[in-house]
Amino acid sequence: MEPNRITALLFTAIALVICSSAVVQAQTNKNTETMSSTTMEEATFGAGCFWCVEAVFEEVKGVKSAVAGYAGGELPNPTYRQVSSGQTGHAEVARITFDPSIISYEQLLEVFWHTHNPTTKNRQGADVGPQYRSAIFYHNEEQKEIAEKSLKKTDKSDLWEDPIVTEIEPLSNYSVAKNYHQNYYENNPNAGYCQVVIAPKLKKFRKDFPHLLKDKVKD
């Protein structure tokens, strides 16, 4: 066989090996991405103003995102003004995407019970109205069962003196709030509400749950 032909065949073989390796790696990456996306779970909590709830859960390890939005109610895709009227039946919520291999739903509920007052009906501090009610919107029957057990356990503890009035209901009529509501504390740390309400809440959360903080929060 001629030397040039041998060289050509050799380069062809090498190219095929490289191409095959690239295909295998691409498929591996795709499978990894798919696996990663399927392991994520979601939780939706109402605990007063969604700026507060979002800010707290954004700092919890294992939480990929906390998105401010609305749940419950009758009106589809309501505006902030409509929800704020208290007439739509919606609650301001944070929809949390989390990795259950890092943080469990039970642990998220523990944070939930400790970072707002679940004993005041339709009220969190100066925020008054059904849109600020304490609520757990479960995504499946397993979450419902876990939430009910967690509520009973917390109610029997000495965490809160008064009875817990948190509503547990299936997630319904959920919609995302406008962009200016997302990451509100991070984008507006010097705003009055952030300084007076959210900052103290975050300070207490960081003190009470150092073991659940993301590394960037600890630093």
Image (spheres, rainbow, N blue to C red):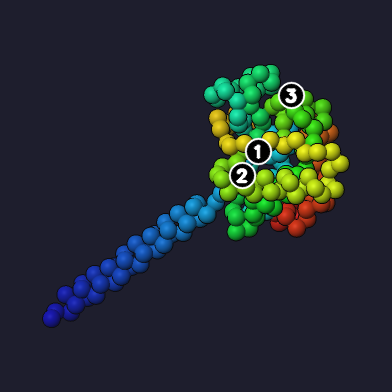
Query: Please, what is the three-letter code of the amino acid marked with disc 2?
Result: Lys
Q: Is residue 146 left or right of residue 115?
A: left
Question: Counting residues from the N terminus, which is met first, the one under dot 3 or under dot 1?
Answer: 3
* Position of residue 102 measured from the top left corner of the image (x, y, whole percent): 63, 58
Please tell me which residue is depicted at 67% across the width and 31% down the height of the picture: 92
Please tell me which residue is depicted at 25% across the width and 72% down the height of the picture: 13
Question: Counting residues from the N terminus, which is met first, the one under dot 3 or under dot 2?
Answer: 3
* Position of residue 138 measured from the top left corner of the image (x, y, whole percent): 60, 41
Q: Which label sits in the foreground, 3 or 2?
A: 2
Q: Which residue is label 2 attached to? A: 144
Residue density around tag 2, few if under 14, some if 14–19, many if 20 or more, within 10 Å:
some
Please tell me which residue is depicted at 36% across the width and 64% down the height of the picture: 24
Query: Please, what is the three-letter code of the amino acid marked with disc 1?
Result: Ile
In which quarter of the view is residue 11 placed? bottom left
Q: Is residue 125 left or right of residue 31?
A: right
Q: Which residue is label 3 attached to? A: 129
Q: Are marks 2 and 1 in contact (CB under 8 Å)?
A: yes
Q: Which residue is label 1 attached to? A: 168
Q: Is residue 36 left or right of residue 9?
A: right
Residue density around tag 1, few if under 14, some if 14–19, many if 20 or more, within 10 Å:
some
Q: Secondary structure at mark 2?
A: helix
Query: Please, what is the three-letter code of the amino acid marked with disc 3?
Result: Gly
